Image (cartoon, helix red, strand yellow):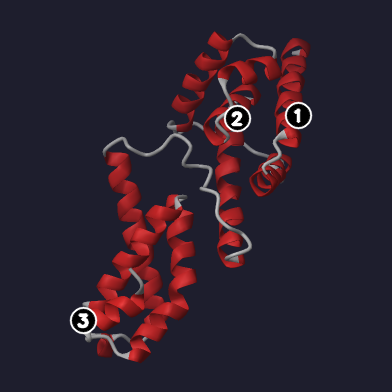
Amino acid sequence: MTTSALIGSTGRVSATDGATFEVMRPRLFGIAYRVLGAAAEAEDVVQDTWIRWHGTNRREIRDPSAFLATATARLAINVADSARARHEAPSAAWLPEAIDRAADPTVAVERDEALEPAVRSLWEKLSAAERAVFVLHEGYDNAYREIAELLELSEVNARQILVRARSRLGSDHRRHLSRGEHRSLLMAITTASQTGDLAQLEQLLADDVVASGRLIIAA
């Protein structure tokens, strides 16, 4: 339901208050999206923010923009915490849902910015093989058979690696990450998300697995 529809149905929000919210809506969506990584959930949070805005004495609010941004962030965090408490957080939450970049360039920027800490976490917590299997299966729904062929593994091994990757992502263990070490993966994921072409990403992940194997042998 749009803000204008709510204004019409309640009659309690002035045109100025409604306009204030609409101007802030893209920013509020971006805030919620960066916390949740899901467009539908982010939109629900924005609507909840509208309801809170609608029920607040706006004469007592000195900075509407700050109030709306803070309310949206808190609501989004509550949703995320609730999902984690119920163990319902999706395993691929690190990869935000695809959005129409042409329709809303602002949200596209928010999405790309949300990827950076997520990809950093993959580098800090997972081995090259774990990253490859997790990204391709959880992020892009590649079949185990396809992943096994690309990485020269058995399907059983690929499944085991994914289980291990999920477990490690949920742990607090992190390795030190050199500045910019994850940038190539970030760029490859961003390109794949924009174009739908996974060739560059698959090649990068496969090369990382091969390189890591060589380092282990050399050690």
The amino acid beneath tag 1 is Gln
Q: Earlier in the sequence, mark 1 or mark 3?
A: 3
Label at residue 19: none
Q: Mark 3: which secondary structure?
A: helix
The amino acid beneath tag 2 is Leu
Q: Residue at x 77, y 15 (%)?
A: 214
Q: Residue at x 44, y 31 (%)?
A: 171
Vertical relation: 137 (above or below) 106: above
- In three-dimensional space, the C-alpha distance between marks 1 and 3, rounded to whole angstroms, equals 55 Å
Residue that badge 2 annotates: 136
Q: Earlier in the sequence, mark 1 or mark 2?
A: 2
Residue that badge 1 annotates: 203
Which numbered mark, 1 or 3, is in the foreground of this view? 3
**Quick check: marks 2 and 3 in contact, CB under 8 Å?**
no
- In three-dimensional space, the C-alpha distance between marks 2 and 3, rounded to whole angstroms, equals 47 Å
The amino acid beneath tag 3 is Thr
Residue that badge 3 annotates: 10
Q: Earlier in the sequence, mark 2 or mark 3?
A: 3
Q: Nearer the viewer, residue 40 or 175?
A: 40
Q: Name the spot of residue 163 as percent of width and height, x first.
A: 47, 20
Q: Name the spot of residue 145 as percent of width and height, x first.
A: 60, 16
Q: Name the spot of residue 100 as percent of width and height, x first.
A: 58, 57
Q: Name the spot of residue 25 as percent of width and height, x first.
A: 44, 72
Q: Nearer the viewer, residue 45 or 63?
A: 45
Does 118 sit left or right of 208 as displayed? left
Vertical relation: 111 (above or below) 8: above
Task: State whether residue 179 appears in this view.
Answer: no
Task: State whether residue 189 appears in this view.
Answer: yes
The quarter of the picture where residue 110 lies is bottom right
